């Protein structure tokens, strides 16, 4: 199969674009995971504080 130079550049650009799209999806997924972990950690800290206040209120 003979490819012209234009076709080779076209296919190279297509592969580069698909690689960039995959990279964007990976970055977006990582950001979403980090946000979920941060929110769950914050909720854990807040629930711990709230539980400690309830325990202090019951005990004292």
Image (cartoon, rainbow, N blue to C red):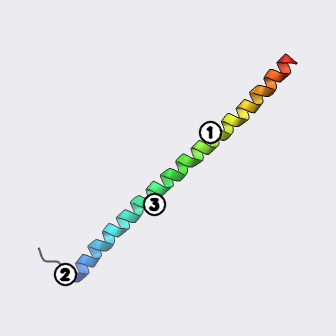
Q: Quadrant of the C terminus?
A: top right
Give the residue furthest to the top: 59
Residue at horizontal 44 percent and vertical 55 percent from the top? 26
Say few, some or many: other residues with alpha carbon within 10 Å of mark 2 (under 14 / 14 to 19 / 20 or more): few
Q: Earlier in the sequence, mark 1 or mark 2?
A: 2
Q: How many marks?
A: 3
Q: Is residue 47 above or below residue 3?
A: above
Q: Quadrant of residue 59?
A: top right
Circle on res. 40: 1
Q: Decide if residue 51 is on the left or right side of residue 44.
A: right
The image position of residue 45, as x and y in percent, is: 70, 36
Judging by the rendered image, the residue that carries numbered circle 3 is: 24
Q: Nearer the viewer, residue 26 or 6?
A: 26
Q: Earlier in the sequence, mark 3 or mark 2?
A: 2
How far apart are labels 3 and 1 at the CA level? 24 Å
Q: Decide if residue 22 is on the left or right side of residue 58.
A: left
Judging by the rendered image, the residue that carries numbered circle 2 is: 4
Give the residue furthest to the right: 60
Say few, some or many: other residues with alpha carbon within 10 Å of mark 1 (under 14 / 14 to 19 / 20 or more): few
């Amino acid at each position: 199969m003979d490819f012209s130079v234009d076709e080779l550049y076209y296919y190279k650009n297509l592969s580069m674009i698909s690689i960039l799209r995959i990279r964007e999806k990976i970055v977006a997924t990582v950001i979403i995971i980090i946000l979920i972990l941060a929110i769950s950690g914050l909720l854990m800290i807040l629930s711990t504080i709230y539980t400690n206040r309830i325990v202090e209120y019951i005990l004292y």
